[in-house]
Image: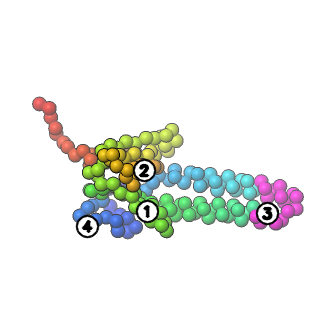
Amino acid sequence: MTHGDSAPSSVNRYLLPHEHQVIMVRRHPAVLLRPVAEVFGGLIIAGLLSKWLGDQGAGGGLVVVWWAWLLLLIRFVWKVAEWSVDYFVVTSKRMLLTTGLITRRVDMMPLGKVTDMSFQRSLLGRMMGYGEFILESAGQDQALSTIPYIPYPETLYLEVCQMLFPGGNDSDD
């Protein structure tokens, strides 16, 4: 998690001149769990099929099996590349979620429009250290409403709440 560090150019181009970055995080690497499982599962299946097809003498089938696994591997590399350019950014004025490697998508919600914010964590999320932010605004459907796979969700939640509800020494004396 970076505080005030300069954003990469892929994110910096979306910041307005009068705002400054406060928080910037990548999504948690757990977003890659499914692609990793697919590649390893595919490798195991390809190995078993190679053994079985090799015993049967079907050389053409081996080529198809390994090309299929190569496609899974290419998909995995693509997912890693996408993950490496996806950022959740909180600036002094708004929240941004930038996603996409070739087709870039930027979802945004002004901080002033947030009426409710919560986070939730699954059991796996609690074990691995990620959660999902849920943002609401006054009766409007926003482009940015859920942000899954956020690392350090408790810390981020408190920091964003501090920005949404600045205060200090309010006393009821």
- Magenta residues, as a range? 48-64
**Within-10-Å neighbours for mark 2: few <14, some 14–19, many 20+:** some
* Residue indicated by mark 2: 147
Q: Decide whether residue 49 is among the magenta residues.
A: yes
Residue at 46%, 41% in the rendered image? 121
Q: Is residue 121 above or below residue 31?
A: above
Q: Could you tell whether 138 is left or right of 85 in the image?
A: left
Residue 126 to residue 23: above or below: above
Q: Earlier in the sequence, mark 1 or mark 3?
A: 3
Amino acid carrying label 2: it is Ile
Image position of 98 with respect to 153: above or below: below
Q: Could you say where residue 47 lies in the image, as x and y percent from the top left?
A: 75, 56
Among the two numbered marks 2 and 4 on one chain, the one whose residue lies closer to the N terminus: 4
Cα distance between the residues tagged 4 and 3: 57 Å
Q: Which residue was labeled with disc 4? A: 17
Q: How many numbered callouts? A: 4
Frontmost residue, 23 versus 93: 93
Classify 10 Å Cα crowding around label 4: few (below 14), some (14-19), many (20 and above). Answer: few
Q: Give the quarter of the figure containing the C terminus.
A: top left
